Image: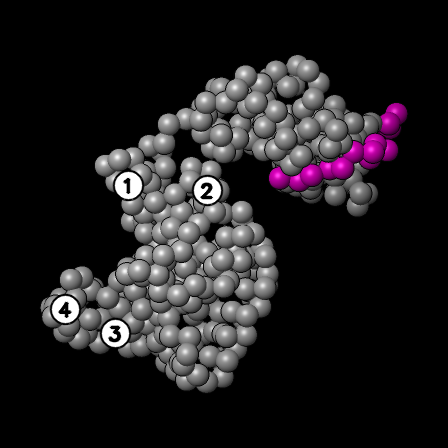
């Protein structure tokens, strides 16, 4: 469980389980949903985490003609005449792993980094998106009673909400600014259908009309860390061309600078005193630190052509990171900028 991508998946599955699992049981871990994709996602993640050998999946529908959601596990089909669409229960029994899972859940709920992923999972289970004829756009999470960890996450993300227990309406979010914040964490992206609906409705918003100079100030305020024009365009709901015009103005004024990495420009404030380089350039710097100082040596160690390596080394020289001595050996410069690798 040391790999961060798996931890993100675990956090999302914690959200799914808290929304639609049986968290009272001490004998087994279960998850119920009508989405084949989410059942598979939950299965794949927990299987990687625990490697259980007694997983069972059950389907309930008004016919037995139901697709198997997970291969190579025990699968049984049951008739439920009330089911308008098939739903599934994923389950495995283990008191030991149940206890371990609940401890993992507690640890993740305390970790602020993973809270947005837990929220994504919970929304995939209990969330909905509505767009009325009066241009009223609503994001909601169905709940009969308040959920403390959901409210803590909302408060941390500065999301404004109201809670309506009537008919399990639960948490309702309707402000445009809060839609922007939830779009930033891709709140609906875990559930394929909800994802499509969310982005379709979100794109229907008209663009903000900023006062003259406001957008420029907002752009530079976000460049304490590196960002692309595409990322900024998404944040401000503007075209990349419009954002690029602003970035060019800021660069001409000497306030920001850009570094091109794999055909993408990354922009950052000049006062941050940082240089951004690619992984391959970072590898060349590492080789120089290990004592390989000739272009030919670096090329041989990195399995690249001398011409290609020389071009990258020359770019590092222009950035002030390297210099070449009289013996045509590459050395690390004494410069005071932090080097970031992307």
Give the residue at x 73% y 32%: 272
- Camera-near label (3 vs 4) is 4
- Camera-near label (3 vs 2) is 2
Give how far across and how far down residue 306 sits, in percent. 67, 30
CA separation, marks 3 and 2?
Answer: 38 Å
| Quarter of the image with the N terminus in it | bottom right
* Residue 9 visible in the picture: no
What are the residue bounds of the magenta stretch? 325-342
> Tags 1 and 3 in contact by the CB under 8 Å rule?
no
Label 4: which secondary element: loop
- Camera-near label (4 vs 2) is 2
CA separation, marks 4 and 2?
Answer: 37 Å
Identify the image's colour scheme: rainbow, by chain, secondary structure or one colour: one colour
- From the viewer's perspective, tell me whether residue 211 is left or right of residue 179: right
- From the viewer's perspective, tell me whether residue 261 is left or right of residue 34: right
- For marks 3 and 2, the one nearer the N-term is 3
* Image vertical order of residue 230 relative to residue 75, above or below: above
Q: Classify mark 4: residues with Cα within 10 Å, few (<14), some (14-19) or many (20+).
A: few
Disc 2 target residue: 178
Give how far across and how far down residue 297 sits, in percent. 74, 38
Disc 4 target residue: 82
Label 3: which secondary element: strand
- Is 341 included in the stretch rendered in magenta? yes
Question: Toward the viewer: 140 or 11?
Answer: 140
- For marks 3 and 4, the one nearer the N-term is 3
> Tags 3 and 4 in contact by the CB under 8 Å rule?
no
Disc 3 target residue: 58
CA separation, marks 1 and 2?
Answer: 15 Å
Disc 1 target residue: 131
- Camera-near label (1 vs 3) is 1
Question: Toward the viewer: 85 or 320?
Answer: 85
- For marks 1 and 2, the one nearer the N-term is 1
């Amino acid at each position: 469980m040391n790999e961060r991508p798996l931890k993100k998946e675990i956090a999302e599955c914690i959200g799914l389980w808290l929304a639609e699992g049986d968290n009272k049981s001490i004998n087994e871990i279960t998850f119920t949903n009508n989405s084949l994709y989410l059942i598979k996602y939950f299965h794949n993640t927990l299987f990687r985490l625990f490697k259980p050998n007694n997983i069972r999946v059950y389907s309930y529908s008004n016919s037995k003609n139901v697709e198997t959601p997970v291969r190579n596990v025990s699968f049984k089909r049951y008739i439920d005449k009330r089911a308008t669409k098939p739903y599934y229960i994923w389950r495995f029994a283990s008191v030991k792993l149940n206890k371990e899972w609940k401890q993992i859940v507690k640890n993740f709920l305390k970790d602020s980094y993973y809270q947005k992923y837990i929220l994504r999972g919970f929304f995939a289970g209990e969330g909905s998106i509505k767009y009325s004829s009066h241009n009223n756009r609503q994001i909601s999470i169905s709940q009969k009673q308040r959920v403390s960890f959901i409210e803590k996450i909302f408060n941390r993300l500065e999301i404004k909400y109201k809670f309506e227990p009537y008919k399990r309406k639960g948490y309702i979010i309707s402000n445009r600014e809060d839609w922007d914040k939830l779009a930033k964490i891709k709140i609906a992206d875990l559930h394929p259908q909800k994802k499509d609906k969310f982005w379709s409705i979100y794109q229907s918003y008209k663009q903000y009309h900023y006062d003259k100079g406001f957008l420029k100030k907002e752009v530079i305020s976000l460049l304490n860390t590196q960002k692309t024009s595409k990322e900024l365009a998404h944040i401000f709901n503007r075209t990349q061309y419009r954002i690029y015009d602003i970035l060019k103005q800021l660069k001409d004024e000497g306030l920001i600078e850009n570094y091109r990495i794999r055909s993408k420009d990354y922009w950052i404030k000049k006062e941050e005193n940082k240089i951004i380089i690619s992984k391959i350039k970072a590898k060349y710097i590492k080789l120089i630190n290990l004592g390989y100082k000739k272009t030919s040596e670096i090329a041989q160690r990195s399995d690249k052509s001398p011409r290609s390596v020389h071009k990258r080394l020359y770019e590092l020289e222009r950035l002030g990171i390297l210099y070449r001595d009289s013996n045509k050996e590459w050395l690390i410069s004494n410069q005071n900028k932090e080097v970031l690798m992307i």
